[in-house]
Amino acid sequence: MKINSKFKVQSSKFLIVLLIIFIGYLFFISSRNSLVFRKKDRLNIVFYGSKIAFYSIGFDDGVNYFINYPSEVKILVPGGFGYYRLGALGKLINLEKQPELYRRSFSTINSNFIDLYFYPVKNEVYYNKEETQIFLPLLSQIATFNSNANILDRMYILFIFASKQKSQFLNMSYLPIKKGRNGEILDERIFSDKLIGYFYQKTYRNENKNVQIIYKNNEENARLIAKIIEGQGIRVVDFAYKKSNDANCQIIINEKTISQTAKGLKNFFNCPVVKGETSSYDIIFMLGNVEHQWEVGS
């Protein structure tokens, strides 16, 4: 009986050690990809649901922005989908099984890099009206909604919004809807040009790196990507066409040290940074397969 008890104690200790190692491993993986440990001047977050909103949290300048999107507006969904009614975007994404389209679509609207997006577990078509007042996400949404945020990110966002008041946000909501004589919607596109320059990263602007974008299909796709990059405070100075069968995207630099600008492009577009010849440019962004992901469409 004593031997049996001793064996049980040793087995329990072994299981506890294994559990600690496993939790430590999960923490390591989460922390490596978490925004908590990345240097960010500004954090851009989208919540999609019965209320659709964008929040931009400023850590460097302390300025926070809020935008509400009525469900009736149409937005450009990159990837060849064209313009789509915002209230039905969740249904489209669920059908295509591409949650990353939340990130690309709202990055296109705002001309910036969306860091995190949250959306309901159950997909519905929404018909919500315009909200004129600022509202903050519910803490339950941060904890339970589907998201590209990991556990550390969720805890981080919970802390941020728990410590914020609505009065700490500037309302940037914009609704350019033109209607006909009978109330029919003639133009329900959000024009992101009006938002360029509000959500830039000061670090990128201070580094002042210039970028050449090389595309292989359509310059319009490259220009859409450029507008988003420029909205982050990164200068795009040139476009070039290059016929290529290489599907891989690349961020090409000629410096020994990887700049924060290059790291930002790498993290957002999921492209490797490689050393190479960049001529008179600081960075060359070879789009490769990224161009298809951001295809303008009809």
Image (cartoon, grey):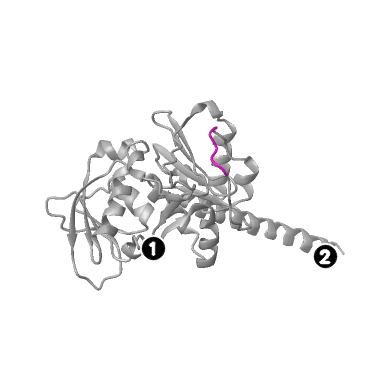
Helix, strand or loop at disc 2?
helix
**Horizontal side of residue 82 vs 241, given as left or right:** right
> Up-down: is 61 above or below 103?
above
For the stretch drawn in magenta, the main secondary structure is loop
Q: Which residue position is annotated with label 2? A: 4
User: Is residue 131 in the magenta section?
Assistant: yes
Q: Is residue 17 visible?
A: yes
In space, the residues marked 1 and 2 are separated at their CA atoms by 62 Å
Q: Quadrant of the N terminus?
A: bottom right
Q: Amino acid at mark 1?
A: Gly
Residue at the right extreme, as displayed: 1
Give percent across and percent down for residue 68. 50, 40
Q: Which residue position is annotated with label 1? A: 79
Q: Earlier in the sequence, mark 1 or mark 2?
A: 2
> Dot 1 surroundings within 10 Å: few (below 14), some, or many (20 or more)?
some
**Horizontal side of residue 23 vs 36, given as left or right:** right
Q: Nearer the viewer, residue 116 or 256?
A: 116
Q: Quadrant of the C terminus?
A: bottom left
> Dot 2 surroundings within 10 Å: few (below 14), some, or many (20 or more)?
few
Q: Amino acid at mark 2?
A: Asn
- The range drawn in magenta is 129-133
- The residue sitting at 51% across, 62% down in the picture is 92
Residue at the bottom extreme, as displayed: 245
Helix, strand or loop at disc 1?
loop
Instruction: Please state which of the two labelled residues, at mark 1 or mark 2, is closer to the viewer.
Output: 1
Q: Nearer the viewer, residue 138 or 28?
A: 138
* Residue 5 sits in quarter: bottom right
Give percent across and percent down for residue 3. 82, 64
- The residue sitting at 12% across, 54% down in the picture is 279
User: Is residue 29 in the magenta section?
Assistant: no
> Up-down: is 50 above or below 269?
above
Q: Is residue 200 visible?
A: no
